[in-house]
Image (spheres, rainbow, N blue to C red):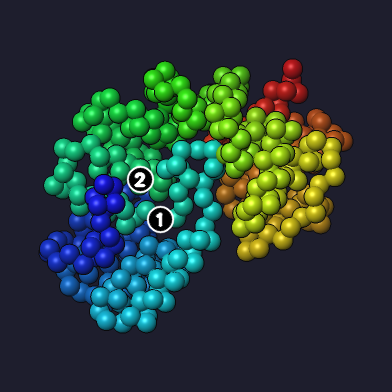
Amino acid sequence: MLVRLSGSLRGTLGARRRQTVDEWAPGPNGSEAEHLFLRAMALYRMGDGRAAINLLRQATAIAPAFADAIEAEGEVLDMSGDTAAALARYEEARRLRQKGRAGAPDRHFVLRQMGSHTSEIVAYTRVLKSLKKFALPNLARGNAYLADRQPELALADYERTLKLHPASLDALALKAEALSALGKYAAAVEDLDKVIAATPKSPDSLNARGIAHMALGHVEQANTDWRRQLELLGGRPSASAYVALRLADYEAALPHLETMVRNDRRDSYWALYLRTAQIRLGQAPASAQAAAGDEWVASLLALQDGSVSSEQVMAMADTAGRRAEVLFQRGVLAHGGDRSAARAYWQQVVELGQPALVEHAAARNELSRSAS
């Protein structure tokens, strides 16, 4: 049903109903590239394919990995009869989507999505113009906003969903995820308590409540949720590895990480985390695999090997999350010889304030364990 509601991108671009260029306004977090993309869609709907292509190309000049804009250009070219050029754009969009890295595998499926979800947001917005009193399209657009890392807009959609369908545990759980993303952790825990009371075997909700508890400094409550999640996962290696890493339980993580290194060579983080667990357990780390196409993970592997300095890697860390990753690895490397230095690094990870990061939870657990 969701597929029918969203429609194809061809339908989104190709419908001929006239509308203003500003009808599809992006959210407050919308980038310049997204603005151009949305204006291009509106212009094409008004019949100006040439102007649409120009704007789409401007968007991809600003954001070369904007797969939605590249695919949209393919749609416009395809519908204008330039099949060869359209196929090239489709292939480029497909390649970019395969290259992206999904969210943490122990989290809710919405948060595991990658890439831009602008097209979905536009499609659901169109549906809501005629079905605004239906819960499902509100929930679906909320999911697209949340996957697109726009939690404030997602929260508004989830709240509308709950007004229309107050008994929806899915909407309540996702509302809690949006609250957590906005830093409203106590409110998130309150909602997740209700969800888990009704569905105590929900791994996603236990994971979300664990993250919110950890953000509030409730280490034992978080760990209780994650241990229960680990039981419910039944040994599923990708998710189980991440939950065990949040717990800083490297022995539990190790076999799952070994499995994932064998089974998923596209994601270089598996090799990084396997070596992290081995170093913390005092084992000789596995030889570092080449992090094909991932310069960032390659730099962290080099840090573990000692072939680059922490200052060099930190200079590459262009986000708070990446700085936390470097600091966490510095703590891991320091722990064997200088536990005071390791704690200092892990304290910095905690202070960066990204509770959803695996490294944040692991650092809090390392600090809690060393203090006991």
Relative horizontal placement of residue 113, taking residue 167 as reference (left or right): right
In this rendering, the answer to whether 237 lies above or below 208 is: below
Question: Which residue corresponds to mark 2?
Answer: 145
Can residue 181 be seen at all in this image of the molecule?
yes
- Tag 2's secondary structure? helix
Residue at 68% over, 52% down: 262
Residue at 41% over, 46% down: 147
| x then y, percent, for residue 19 | 14, 61
Question: Which residue corresponds to mark 1?
Answer: 116
| x then y, percent, for residue 136 | 25, 39
Residue at 50% over, 38% down: 107
- Tag 1's secondary structure? loop
| x then y, percent, for residue 364 | 65, 28
Between 354 and 212, the one nearer to me in the picture? 212
| x then y, percent, for residue 332 | 76, 39
Q: Earlier in the sequence, mark 1 or mark 2?
A: 1
In this rendering, the answer to whether 279 lies above or below 102 is: above
Relative horizontal placement of residue 122, taking residue 361 as reference (left or right): left
Gap in angstroms between the C-alphas marked 1 and 2? 10 Å
Picture quarter with the C terminus? top right
Question: Crowding at label 2, few (<14), some or many (≥20) Cα neighbours within 10 Å?
Answer: many
Going by the numbered disc 1, the residue's amino acid type is Ser
Going by the numbered disc 2, the residue's amino acid type is Tyr
